[in-house]
Image (cartoon, rainbow, N blue to C red):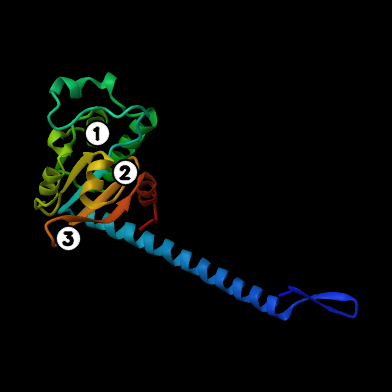
Amino acid sequence: MSLLRRGAGRCFPNPWWLGALRLAGGLVALLALGCAAMAIEDELDEAHAIAELQRGGNVVYLRHAARFAGPREKLDRWSSAAQFADCRRQRNLTPEGQVQAREIGAYWRMLRIPVQRVIANAPCRTRDTAILAFGAAEVDPRLFDVDFLRQLTLQPVPAGTNTVIVGSDSQLRDLTGVDLGFAEVALLKPDGKGGVTVVARLDVDDWADAAEPGWW
């Protein structure tokens, strides 16, 4: 079908094509409105998640902050303490990652999010993320085991505090199917089937936004 029609030696847009353009414009406008609504919904979700953390009684999973690239280490729950302590052979936090970890701790303190227990996997990058963010951590290589991680996430947490688990992306992915970015936090809730599900995700930028005056 021609997009133009001729009349008196001049070309005019075909009325069918004009109608299609109007329809496309309407769809674009609807899409823009939908995207705006989704953005608003995301902000509400972030606010709800932060309010949950301020009340306490939650388990959250924090993926370690940004690290250097390199070959994957051959570490698991059975590796020796000396192997875990040898940071020279591991993909450690970058300077940016160290800043990310410190910022998370600072934002949580600004937002008055209570933390009583911090458990970190044994590699240097997870341990260092936990210590830079929260000052101290239990180090437990059993976090390599997804069954141990599941049991840990299902343990009740008293109101007024939160439990933070600091690990890599692979363990949470095996448990929930969710991939986290560097320094991203997942708020976990029981799924009623013996496991947990991710109900909210927040990255460093989300914490920075929430700490801004007037965000609430």
Q: Is residue 212 left or right of residue 114?
A: right
Q: Is residue 100 above or below residue 208?
A: above
- Label 1 or label 3, whichever lies nearer to me, is 3
In space, the residues marked 1 and 2 are separated at their CA atoms by 19 Å
Relative to the observer, which residue lies in front, 37 or 210? 37
Question: Which element carries disc 2, helix, strand or loop?
Answer: helix
Question: Which element carries disc 3, helix, strand or loop?
Answer: loop
- Label 2 or label 3, whichever lies nearer to me, is 3
Q: Inspect this view and state whether residue 139 appears.
A: no
Q: Is residue 91 left or right of residue 194?
A: right
Coordinates of residue 8 in the picture (x, y in percent)? 90, 80
Mark 1 and mark 2 lie on one chain; the one further toward the N terminus is 2
Dot 1 and dot 3 residues touching (CB under 8 Å):
no
In space, the residues marked 2 and 3 are separated at their CA atoms by 29 Å
Q: Amino acid type of disc 3?
A: Asp
Mark 2 and mark 3 lie on one chain; the one further toward the N terminus is 2
Q: Residue at x 22, y 47 (%)?
A: 174
Quick one: label 3, few (<14), some, or many (20+) residues within 10 Å?
few
Give the residue number, with chain letter if any, for mark 2. 107
Question: Which element carries disc 1, helix, strand or loop?
Answer: helix
Relative to the observer, which residue lies in front, 73 or 115? 73
Name the mark on residue 126: 1
Coordinates of residue 82 in the picture (x, y in percent)? 16, 19
Relative to the observer, which residue lies in front, 78 or 66? 78
Coordinates of residue 48 in the picture (x, y in percent)? 29, 60
Q: Residue at x 35, y 35 (%)?
A: 66
Q: Is residue 170 above or below residue 178?
A: above
Q: Amino acid type of disc 2?
A: Tyr
Name the mark on residue 191: 3
Quarter of the N terminus within the rendering:
bottom right
Q: Amino acid type of disc 1?
A: Thr
Relative to the observer, which residue lies in front, 122 or 178? 178
